[in-house]
Structures are given as C-alpha cells and as structure tokens.
Image: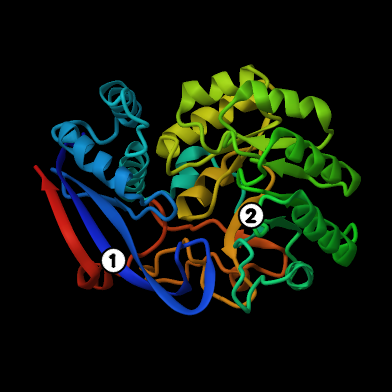
Amino acid sequence: VSIIRRITVQAYTYQLEDFGPTIYTYTSGVSMEVSKFVVTVETEDGVQGSYAPHFGATQHALAQVNAMAPGLIGQRAEQRELIFERLKLDFRHFDKTGIGALDTALWDLAGKKHGASISTMLGGYRERLPVYASTTPGQKTPGGLDSIEKYADFAQYCRERGIPAFKIHSFFDGDPKTEIGIMKAVRERVGDSMKLMTDPASSLPSFMAAVEVGRACDDLNFFWFEDPYRDASSSANAQKRLRGFIQTPMLVAEHIRGFEQKADFVLSGGTDIMHIDPELDGGITGTIKLAHFCDAIGMEVQLHTAGPMHRHCMSAIFNTHFYELGLVNPDRAWNGLQPPIYADDYGDRVEDVGADGCVPVPVGPGLGVTYDWDKIKAWETGRMVFE
C-alpha cells in the first residue's frame, strides 16, 4: 500500500522563440513568455510520480490542481479510480481540468513502483503510432505558412518523410473560400497519397459557411471535418444538423469536458468521431473510460494534441487512427506546444517521425520519459507543497 504523503506543484516560465502572440502562432523573430507547471506525487514508501502537461498546462488547470491536491494527502496512490470519482464529485461546479495532471502523475507513480510502462499497465499493444501532421495556423507575417502554396509545399514535405496524413489549420479568417482554397491546393499536390483533414477551429462565421466547407470536404475526399463554426462545437443539435448536410465524418467535442458530458454529446448525435483531450478530460483514467464507451457503440476516437501520456493511451486504444503531431510548421523545428524540459530524446517534431510514419511509445517505467529538473528549477516561478 502506497499512501500519498506529499504533492508538489511547480510553476515555471520560459521563452518560446518564433511564436507570438500565442503558442499557436508562428511569427519569425519574436518571442513570448510561456507559463506551465509540473506536479509530483510522493508516497510514504518513497515512490514518486510526475507529470508536466503540454497543451493542458493552463493557469486555470494549475489553480484546480492546487485546489485538488490537499484532498489526495493520506489517500492510497493505487486507488486512481476512487480518487478520480472523488475529485469529479468534489469539483462538480467546475470543468475539472485539474484532474488530468494529478491522475497522470499517479499512473506514472504506479508504473515506477512496479517497473512497468503505463502502456503495459493499460494492456497496450502498439509500440509505434502512425501520425498526422497538424499544422500551426497560417500567418500574415512572412515565412512559415504564409500562403496557400506553402500549405501544399509542407504537405508534400511531410509525405516525403513518410507521414501518412495531414491536417490543415488555415488562416482562421472566417472565409470559406480561403479554407477551401487551401484544401484544394493540398489535395492537388499530394493526390490520394495522404489522408487529409481540416480544422477551422470554430472560425467559420455561420452554419451555412460550415455546410459549404463540409461539402468541399466531400468533394475532395477528406478523412474528417473538425470543429467547424462559431458554436465552438458545443451544440450537439447543431452538429447533428450539420452532419445531415454532408458525408465527411465529423470530429467534434474538443470543447466539451468530462466523461458524462461527452457521452451525452455522442448519444445526442453530435459527432461521428469523438475528440478526447487526455490532459483536460480526466487524464488517463478519463481517456480510457471514454475510449471504451465509444468502442462499445461503434465509434472511433481521436486524442487531441501530443505528449507522452497521449502515446501511452493511444497504444492501448483499438478504436483510433492517428497520433496528432501538432502543432508543426515548415520554418520552425520546435513544436510550440511541447515544453522544452525533456532530458532525453522525446520530441513531437516532424523530424522525430520515423520513415514508417510513426513515433514510438516510451518504454521505461511509468511515462518512460526523463524531465530536466535542473532546468525546471531554474525557470521556477512558484511552488506549492501539500503534506
């Protein structure tokens, strides 16, 4: 029995070069300050587990982790299911995004205690994961994806590296013609050699604009159409109506949080493929619950964004296609969503993809990655210790 005796939450800040004003926007020659955090759970028998979120390291998630952590002191670290249910109950008035980091740290702890990877503990069967290149949005500044032609060039480059699929994040200008222009250029360049997807990220201004782009997806044989217009994919009824106008499968529910809410969205006809964010939808425990639910009703899932935890989850999920290698840009080797805190060779860049179009599942105990704790300490801006 491993009793939780201490939880440490370290906030840290670093400079991200060639991005700004957001971590999604490539802008050559500028830099921005990025704040993230790492959580470490320690037990009375001396075992530790840690997790440093990527996309999900938001300030409100950090606040929730700090609010949730005291309730875990004295609990049995192995009882992840019970802890998950208690946190879900205690924080029912909130979106519960703090659960993900704590849950993943507990899985890392269990893996280190028993000398097994999280993939092994989940019954994972994949050692390598097929990826899709998920682009940064287009930009108005020179370089990167500053034109329709650059999208086609980048898709061709990714295909030449063996990557089997490519997802467009366009200029987000709200114009269906721009979206469709990029889609046509990329399809023309790569032909049928890649599966293609597009994600307007809720930028299309109206339902009919979404229908227009969706029908272009049909004509161009796109693999899925994601999160199209300004309802932010929060209305199951709206997405169900949209599905009735187009043939391309919809990937929705990125902005719906939690197991029950996402299950309701699916059962209401709101999507063809379920979008799960492992960091924001309850960590590993929540992700596997959702994946199994969808599998039971004949639905595939896709995991949102990238990270070592995502790889372990995907290794054990039968009903999923691709690992999202995002966000990537032709002029910037570094993935802006990945914090530069790894002391090993873990990476989510195009250059980290093998000739087989896949990335590996980490094989060491727990998450199987090594954090650079000296770097995290040097960048530390705040620390909370709960005992």
Pick whichever, 119 or 387, lies toward us.
387
Query: x and y percent of residue 59 in the render?
Result: 30, 49
Query: x and y percent of residue 387 in the render?
Result: 9, 42
Above or below 75: residue 188: below
Where is mark 2, residue-wise? 172
Q: What is the secondary structure assignment of the residue under circle 1?
A: strand
Above or below 55: residue 356: below
Q: In the current view of this chain or complex, which residue is farthest to the bottom?
A: 29
Amino acid of disc 1? Thr
Mark 2, Cα crowd under 10 Å, few <14 / some 14-19 / many 20+, is: some
Considering only order in the chain, which callout, 1 or 2, is on the residue closer to the N terminus? 1
Which image quadrant is residue 168 in?
bottom right
Amino acid of disc 2? Phe
Which image quadrant is residue 216 in?
top right
Left or right: where 307 falls relative to 324: left
Residue at 52%, 43% (x, y): give it.
Answer: 313
